[in-house]
Image: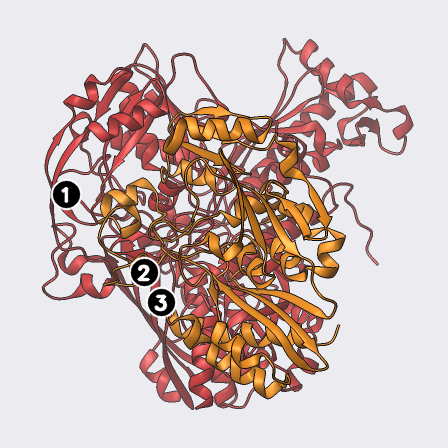
Amino acid sequence: MTIDPFLIVGKRYPRIDSKDKVTGRTKYLDDLKFPGMLHGKVLRSPYPHARILRIETARAERLPGVRAVVTIEDTPRVPFGSYRSGVKDELIFAMEKVRYVGDEVAAVAAIDEETALEALDLIEVDYEPLPALLSIDEAMKPDAVRIHDDAEGNIASHTVTVRGNPEKGFEEADLVLEDRFETPLQIHGYLEPVGCIAAWDASGRLTIWAPSQNPSWSRIIFSEALNVPIGRLRVIQTFIGGAFGGKLEQKLYLIAAVLAQKAKKPVKMVNTRDEEFQTSMPRVPMRIDLRMGVRKDGLLTAKEHRIFADNGAYTKYASAVVNLGTYRVDGLYRLRNIRNENFLIYTNKLPTSAFRGFGNPQITFAMESMLDHLAEGIGMDPLDLRLRNAAEPGDITAHGFHYISCGLKECFKQVSEAIEWKRKRSQKGSGRGLGISATSHVCGNRSFFPLFDGATAYVRIDEGGNVKVITGEVEVGQGLLTAYATIVAETLGVMPRMVTVEPPDTDVAPFGLGTWGDRGTFIGGAAVKLAAAEARKELLAVASEMLEADPSDLDCKEGKVFVKGSPEKGLPFHEVAATAVYTRGGAPILGKGTFIPNSEIADSTRYGNVSGAYAFGAQAAEVEVDEETGRIRLVEVVAAHDVGRALNRTTTEGQIEGATVQGIGYALFEEVEFAEGVMLNPDYLNYRVPTALDVPPITSLIVETIDPAGPFGAKGVAEPAMTPTAPAIANAIYNATGVRIKRLPITPEKVLGSLRKTKV
Amino acid sequence: MRNFEYFEPKDVNEALGLLSEHGEKATLLAGGTDLIPRMKKGLISPSYVVNIAQIASLQKIEEDQEGLKIGAMVPLSVLERHPVLAVRYSALHRASGHVGTPSLRNVATLGGNVCLGTRCIYADQVQTWRRTLEPCLKRGGERCYVVPGGKTCHSSLASDTIPALLAMDAKVTILFPSGQRTIPIHGLYTGDGLHPLKLTHGELLTRIILPSLPTGARSAYLRYSFRKAIDFPLISAGFYMEQNEGVCVDVRIALGALAPGPIRLSPLEEQLKGETITTKLLRHCSEEAPKEALRSSRSGRILAFVRRMITHLVYHGLTEVSEPR
């Protein structure tokens, strides 16, 4: 047995932000108020597609209490996009045309929200309705009108990627299957609506307070859209009440900035829940035509997909979702012969974008569903088929990913044992079934931000012994603050609660790419660890004078700095910290750490090792299907994830459980519906996120592969943990009933309809 | 939300006075779990809100020879934990426990649930939605989105407690400035989606009376919803049966959420009365149920599925109330 060398890493400490949250002390954006602050509201398009003939704001401007009314005329009209190397098809307000119900047409700032709302009603807009293209099929018709003039065929992006020799691969197969899968528009479902406060100072410098997932990166895009130099713009992240990819660059922040500039006052804007649904950049719906070949011995020989993805009216991150998100699945199993074709299609619906999993849940649902039929076709256990092809450490995938640590097979082993795969799969009948599925994911993605990859952090210790971490990375609810506190506490030998992490302020924090792509712990955490190590070195140097010992003979643990072997003679941590400040002209101990992962920008064919590490996971579900009602009862979900190392077991399990619940929603409940281009269920009553009663026991199993590059070996888990849930459930339903539902969500109505068909 | 004046009368007379003084501009607040979201959405904009939470007489549960009298302002969470209800009025007991979530049931009241009115995913949309599409019948237009081409409003009376109370033959007492009346609960509903309640302005529903039930009588409540909490039912169903040595003496089947009013399956009740209850008979009745239930109404979306779930609920409900205690 090995001795656990850690006092804090891998243990179960409470989250450092939990007490403030549960006692209502955490200040979110909407809790902030400034003197003279105005309230802004947006006038949105009531049409899915229409020409703007006239906008008349005079009556609104005359309403007492109104301080500013703005339209496209008040903006620099510089097209911008969310994805740096992608399409720039957006302006701050609609110009000439509106392209979806909810498109921003004008905005008002007034002394209170009621006045702003009243003023919206006084803005007159004349529209000439245009044909609305509400589905990818309508948008792709040869005679369809163009949603954007320069997008022929309403295609926002089209890519083809070929690896190996797919034709030969299919020839070598003993069985080739082809099928179509469809995935719905899923809403992030966070509780805190998007909001912001924008204020310009007298010198013309703009500050935006917002629950932003990527303050430093946002600033670049905002500077472009507002035509303000980066240095004249400051973004301060406020505490985030859930994000899941939805709180990247939001247009609302820009609108607030334009209003604040015109009104010369701070302007606060907060979405209502229905605005949140209408404009919040949810998951990209996809129609996936998938073809795969397998040999009798279980070797997967080829894979081909053609995806039609619904971009909505503007290109946010959907081009990256479809092009950089859906090819990761090809490295989950050892696929060599691949052809991927992706179409991103404009429609007159809300723009879709980044959401936990980033394209992976869509394509993984399709591929993992098909694997069960391939296994069935060659008479192989679906688990054995997966194990036969599963990625292993040392693999270089068809797209050039280098897998250093990879616990995929161990994840399969642990879930299949925990759910008693072999025993239960051999028992037929009883309406119960088991399904399994897996995922692989990046931990950061070099291709996203070509300028650099990496992160930088400072660890500062003041004269009171308080330890402060300053980074550009963002807590979005995933537990990043606690992860960083754990890393620092372990390194400095203090308790995690002694450590606080400052929310990013672009004037203070180092440039950080923010929270997305499972990069927070792996990349940001590695920087924090290096910074903490440097702080420790400084601390020990100061203590070596005080203790008259060589720094290499010193150690710090449990709040004390001491000569190794005699902790009883040690100095309290805070005394050393105070001495450091008072003997060095007020300079606090300050460690700086920079981590640059071993990643590369993918080439023009998207080939390259884009991430410094890769995360893996497998999940199994057991279901019971009532053949009279079609009702699906989840008996259990077991989720095993290769997290590198769990820095905190409780928060790691929390991440796995939360993601699995989101996966259950994707599998069984969640779908935005439209009527004539208008969202039909823009609230949490009619858009059904699973409740606690709809969620079965979830067993989280942590697989530790100790990645050599991660902080203490840690990788990411937030995104991959939701990906395998839906296909595992779909496969379990197939196992229980023989019914294959290829379109999420799997509702009782769909199951019952298919059951009847199979019975006739 | 539009500004309004707020009142908390201390007794029913004060409440009645406020109601008659402000007429159509006043709205009763009887818990508010449905009213407040509707006000926020701008579906109703009362100038006066009369909260009757402080009226002690509306909070009581009393029993006498007439039966169990439940004050309109008794919270649903009290009913779901009430020992008498659990034993003798199983249908209402269970229906109360199905509404919303535990925290909503702490606030929502039986009177509020009985006077819930109808709902519709199209008619109940936020203002931006209503700006976009032509108004429906319920919002003063001429169109029905539930049943395209429909000439009447197809909103849904989706309260959980109404079918349960109908099955138990409950009565309600309504107070008005010059007196009061006690009527069978089915008399409270018009079946018209535009004006689903037979209550006029100035009237106050004060209590719900459950009749004393003969020994051997059983009641039950079943519902179909997508999630196990929060959701309103897609179909709700209340059942009551009284048997004598295996022969059905009296039976009531009431369905909710399918139409603007509750639906009694009277033809099926007639088929069951006087008959010896067998599985075959119940099977037959449940197969007939969708036809009877949807005769006067149409649930536009997922109709085939709704039919099958009606059969499912009616079969299981009747089975439950016909089993010996």
Q: Is B291 or A226 nearer to us in this picture? A: B291
- For label 3, the SS is loop
Chain under label 3? B
Which chain is depicted red? A
- For label 2, the SS is loop
Q: Are marks 2 and 1 in contact (CB under 8 Å)?
A: no
- For label 1, the SS is strand
The Cα atoms of the two marked residues, 2 and 1, are separated by 31 Å
Q: Is A758 or A358 nearer to us in this picture? A: A758
Q: Position of residue B178 (x, y in %)?
A: 49, 34
What is the number of the mark on residue A475?
A: none
Q: Which residue is mark 3?
A: B298
Q: Which residue is mark 1?
A: A97
What is the number of the mark on residue B146?
A: 2
Q: Position of residue B133 (x, y in %)?
A: 23, 49
Looking at the image, is A113 positioned above or below residue A716? above
Q: Is A588 or B151 nearer to us in this picture? A: B151
Q: Are marks 1 and 3 in contact (CB under 8 Å)?
A: no
User: In percent of the image, x 64 and y 71: which residue is there?
Assistant: B241
Kindly indicate the quadrant of the structure image that contains residue A387: bottom right
Which chain is depicted orange? B
Q: Residue furthest front?
A: B178
Looking at the image, is A506 positioned above or below residue A705? above
The Cα atoms of the two marked residues, 2 and 3, are separated by 8 Å
Q: Amino acid at mark 1?
A: Lys
